[in-house]
């Protein structure tokens, strides 16, 4: 697959600019996947099965050679990725390309942010700039993860890959989004927070676009309590945090 451009500005908190050097994702998240819904809506893919077969943007590095000199003075943090996964589980060719993208961005003085449901390679610690590496972790329940993230990395291996980078001095973060309601999985948020307490930042957000959430009596109060719990935990442990818009309704989120 060939594209005409790659880097674009975005409003997400992960980074002010982003790029997507892959179309599709084999993780097959069933929350549902917002990226898939948008890709289908705009005609980039026709079916869910097509989405599960990732296509690499073949001219990624060529485009970056042209675009990075133009954007480097504007970018505070370049995010990989907004609509796909840069370290897609068991896709070594995607991981290798992502590493090359990070190296090229860093060579132009551009810091990067990464978010994955795969495994973060230990070699990322060798990159020259202060990049930020993150994973999505919404549950420690492997059965739930296998049901809703069937192609993603096992959750405990995912967390360990993040901790390995953290222990080598990398800045790390965890996205607890989309966090499921108790009628989807019975779990203790405190247990999850304790397991990821080594990280530098936690992002927490509710689950959208799923009728199961609205079927849970008092779901907004549930998310308010969870958000407050995350805020309290982070303040106590000295961890940066961000509560996603629409998650905490009764009080102003940080």
Image: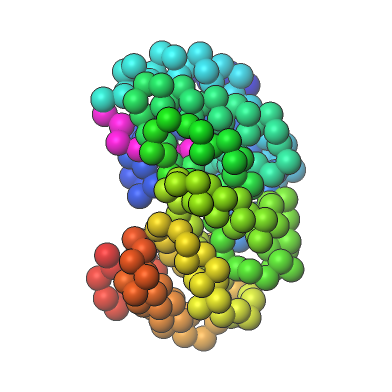
Q: Residue at x 55, y 68 (%)?
A: 195
Type of colouring: rainbow
Within the magenta stretch, is there residue 30?
no
Q: Residue at x 63, y 81 (%)?
A: 186
Residue 151 in percent (x, y) is at 72, 50
Q: Residue at x 34, y 16 (%)?
A: 69
User: With respect to residue 98, does 32 lie above or below?
Assistant: below
Q: Looking at this rendering, what residue extends furthest in the front direction? A: 168
User: With respect to residue 215, does 147 lie above or below?
Assistant: above
Q: Give the prevailing secondary structure in the magenta stretch.
A: loop
| Mark count | 0
- The foreground one among 43 and 15 is 15
- The foreground one among 245 and 68 is 68
Numbered range of the magenta stretch:
74-81
Q: Is there any visible trace of residue 146 in the rendered image?
A: yes
Q: Residue at x 60, y 79 (%)?
A: 187
Residue 232 in percent (x, y) is at 35, 76
Which of the image's four quarters has the N terminus?
Answer: top right
Which of the image's four quarters has the C terminus?
Answer: bottom left
- The foreground one among 122 and 174 is 122
Residue 252 in percent (x, y) is at 25, 71
Instruction: Indicate left or right for 136 with 250 as reference.
Output: right
User: With respect to residue 222, does 102 lie above or below?
Assistant: above
Residue 134 in percent (x, y) is at 49, 50
Q: Is there any visible trace of residue 43 in the rendered image?
A: no
- Quadrant hosting residue 148: bottom right
């Amino acid at each position: 697959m060939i594209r005409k451009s790659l880097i674009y500005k975005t409003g997400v908190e992960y980074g002010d600019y982003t790029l997507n050097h892959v179309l599709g994702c084999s993780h097959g998240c069933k929350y549902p996947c917002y990226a898939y819904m948008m890709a289908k809506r705009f005609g980039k893919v026709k079916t869910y099965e097509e989405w599960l077969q990732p296509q690499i943007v073949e001219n990624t590095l060529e485009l970056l050679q042209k675009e990075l000199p133009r954007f480097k003075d504007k970018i505070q943090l370049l995010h990989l990725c907004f609509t796909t996964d840069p370290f897609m589980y068991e896709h070594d060719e995607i991981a290798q390309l992502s590493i090359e993208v990070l190296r090229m961005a860093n060579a132009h003085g551009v810091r990067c942010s990464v978010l994955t449901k795969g495994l973060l390679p230990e070699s990322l610690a060798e990159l020259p700039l202060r990049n930020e590496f993150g994973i999505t972790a919404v549950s420690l329940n492997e059965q739930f993860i296998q049901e809703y993230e069937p192609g993603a990395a096992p959750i405990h291996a995912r967390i360990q890959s993040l901790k390995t980078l953290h222990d080598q001095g990398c800045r790390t973060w965890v996205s607890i989004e989309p966090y499921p309601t108790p009628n989807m999985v019975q779990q203790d948020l405190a247990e999850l927070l304790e397991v990821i307490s080594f990280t530098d930042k936690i992002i927490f957000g509710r689950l959208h676009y799923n009728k199961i959430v609205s079927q849970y009596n008092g779901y907004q109060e549930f998310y308010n309590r969870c958000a407050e719990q995350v805020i309290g935990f982070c303040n106590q442990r000295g961890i940066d945090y961000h509560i996603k818009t629409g998650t905490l309704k009764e009080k102003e989120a940080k």
